[in-house]
């Protein structure tokens, strides 16, 4: 019998809270029988949304948290001062073992700080990277790090590569995933000081399939499965990816609706186009996990609707079933032993 995955869900985080968050939770329990959800936040607001739905009341529980960390608040101060916020209360459920995972569409900074301070890093993990899946011509690639560590050192990037490899192998079923480091050219001698120092370390690492440098233009083609970089570059790549995708889809729709002939053509290609666009929809892949922690913390887009919330909850089920945190811990411990 499969284990129950218990997910603490920040019901107050994001642009569409609590309505879309609650709907995503209801959808998740209807799709997956082995999940239990703690909706964390202002009880009255959550209950006002829950009454709209029929659901298994034994698998959705409301955990009251009176405070909300706003997007513009300084993350460290917010985590320290707002002890009764939905983010802090939810993460404490993970820390104490009452929940297996925490999911939030709220303040990214607060989630990153709370993850490392409250949930805590696995022993031996120097930095915990944020790692979203991004769509490519071949399916998807893992971008690691995209926002957590802007001052990463070479040893950190090597750990990112190893954690990303574990994730892609066991969550996305990619055998022997290719790892590439973001660079401004294919040659080893190119790049800034961080890339030049990291490149030989990645090449020497025995437990990753290092494919060398990957230029930004090659990322959408799926040249590598794990894209390694520090958070400044990673966040730019992610935001440009999302913005370009949204503009292209908008322009395609605009072109298809521009004339009577194009509208007729649009009707003919609609099924195929819908499937193509779906493959580039980031909400299909769930949120971005903060890897290397003692429990699972996942950040979703601030604009998340119910579909992304639901898919992120289901992603947490897979994460637990595959024992990813334990496998990352084993990987890091093996690295430490070999260094001794």
Image (spheres, rainbow, N blue to C red):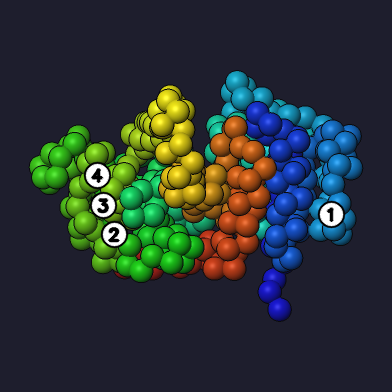
Q: For marks 1 and 2, give the CA distance.
A: 42 Å
Q: Are marks 3 and 2 in contact (CB under 8 Å)?
A: yes
* Residue 241 figure quarter: top left
Residue highlighted by disc 3: 223
| Apparent side of residue 232 relative to residue 99 in the rendered image (left or right) | left
Mark 3 is surrounded, within 10 Å at the Cα level, by few (under 14), some (14 to 19) or many (20 or more) other residues, namely many
Q: Position of residue 237 (x, y in %)?
A: 35, 35
Give the SS element for disc 1: loop
- The residue at the point 14 percent across, 45 percent down is 186
Which circle, 4 or 2, is nearer the viewer?
Answer: 4
Q: Which mark is residue 55?
A: 1
Q: For marks 3 and 2, give the CA distance.
A: 8 Å
Viewer-side residue, 131 vs 31: 31
> Quick one: label 3 or label 2, which is nearer the N terminus?
2
> Quick one: label 3 or label 1, which is nearer the N terminus?
1
> Quick one: label 1 or label 2, which is nearer the N terminus?
1
Q: For marks 3 and 1, give the CA distance.
A: 43 Å
> Quick one: label 4 or label 3, which is nearer the N terminus?
4
Give the SS element for disc 2: strand
Q: Are marks 1 and 2 in contact (CB under 8 Å)?
A: no
* Residue 178 figure quarter: bottom left
Residue highlighted by disc 4: 218
Q: For marks 4 and 2, give the CA distance.
A: 13 Å
Mark 4 is surrounded, within 10 Å at the Cα level, by few (under 14), some (14 to 19) or many (20 or more) other residues, namely few
Q: Are marks 4 and 3 in contact (CB under 8 Å)?
A: yes
Q: Is residue 333 visible?
A: no
Q: Which mark is residue 336?
A: none
Q: Position of residue 98 (x, y in %)?
A: 75, 57
Residue highlighted by disc 2: 178
Viewer-side residue, 56 vs 68: 56
């Amino acid at each position: 019998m499969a284990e129950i995955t218990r997910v603490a869900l920040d019901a107050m985080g994001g642009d569409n809270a609590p309505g879309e968050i609650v709907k995503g939770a209801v959808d998740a329990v209807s799709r997956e029988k082995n999940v239990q959800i703690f909706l964390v936040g202002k009880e009255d607001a959550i209950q006002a949304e829950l009454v709209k739905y029929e659901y298994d009341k034994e698998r959705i529980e409301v955990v009251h948290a009176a405070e909300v960390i706003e997007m513009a608040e300084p993350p460290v101060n917010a985590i320290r001062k707002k002890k009764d916020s939905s983010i802090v209360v939810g993460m404490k459920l993970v820390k104490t073992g009452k929940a297996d995972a925490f999911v939030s569409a709220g303040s990214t900074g607060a989630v990153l700080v709370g993850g490392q301070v409250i949930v805590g890093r696995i022993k031996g993990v120097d930095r915990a990277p944020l790692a979203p899946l991004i769509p490519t011509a071949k399916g998807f690639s893992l971008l690691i790090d995209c926002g957590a560590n802007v001052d990463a050192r070479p040893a950190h990037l090597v750990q990112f590569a190893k954690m990303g490899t574990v994730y892609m192998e066991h969550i996305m079923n990619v055998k022997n995933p290719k790892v590439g480091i973001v660079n401004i050219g294919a040659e080893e001698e190119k790049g800034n000081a961080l890339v030049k120092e990291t490149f030989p370390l990645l090449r020497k690492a025995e437990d990753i399939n290092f494919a060398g440098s990957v230029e930004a233009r090659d990322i959408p083609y799926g040249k590598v499965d794990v894209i390694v970089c520090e958070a400044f570059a990673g966040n730019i790549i992610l935001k440009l990816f999302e913005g370009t995708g949204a503009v292209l889809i908008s322009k395609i729709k605009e072109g298809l609706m521009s004339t009577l002939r194009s509208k007729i053509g649009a009707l003919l290609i609609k099924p195929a186009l819908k499937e193509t666009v779906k493959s580039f929809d980031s909400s299909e892949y769930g949120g971005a996990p903060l890897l290397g922690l003692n429990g699972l913390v996942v950040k979703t887009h601030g604009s998340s609707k119910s579909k992304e919330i639901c898919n992120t909850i289901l992603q947490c089920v897979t994460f637990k079933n595959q024992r990813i945190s334990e496998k990352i811990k084993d990987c890091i411990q093996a690295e430490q032993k070999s260094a001794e």
